[in-house]
């Protein structure tokens, strides 16, 4: 079995602590969209959270 979303997020945050807030938002949105709810707005929230992480990574580069 592969790495779950929470363990993956912790690994990323260990390597890139400055991304913690953004990574936590993506993880929360991913879990909600894939395991808890099945609502279109959850997928939209996930997309926005991923976009924020990408922007954070670019800003740190």
Image: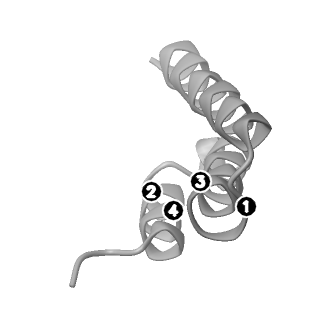
When the figure is inspected, residue 5 is found, relative to residue 57, above or below; the finding is below
The structure residue drawn at horizontal position 52% and vertical position 23%, both measured from the top left corner, is 54
Q: Which residue is mark 1?
A: 37
Element carrying mark 4: helix
First of labels 2, 1 by sequence position: 2
Q: Which residue is mark 4?
A: 9
Q: Nearer the viewer, residue 58 or 23?
A: 23
First of labels 3, 1 by sequence position: 3
The CA distance from mark 1 to mark 4 is 20 Å
Q: Which residue is mark 2?
A: 12
First of labels 3, 2 by sequence position: 2
The CA distance from mark 3 to mark 2 is 15 Å
The structure residue drawn at horizontal position 60% and vertical position 24%, both measured from the top left corner, is 56
- Mark 4 vs mark 2, foreground winner is 4
First of labels 1, 4 by sequence position: 4
Q: Quadrant of the N terminus?
A: bottom left
First of labels 4, 3 by sequence position: 4
The CA distance from mark 3 to mark 1 is 10 Å
The CA distance from mark 4 to mark 3 is 11 Å
Q: How is the image coloured?
A: one colour
């Amino acid at each position: 079995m592969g790495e779950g979303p929470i363990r993956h997020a912790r690994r990323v945050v260990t390597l890139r602590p400055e991304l913690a807030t953004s990574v936590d938002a993506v993880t929360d949105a991913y879990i909600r969209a894939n395991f808890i709810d099945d609502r279109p707005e959850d997928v939209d929230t996930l997309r926005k959270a991923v976009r924020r992480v990408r922007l954070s990574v670019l800003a740190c580069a």
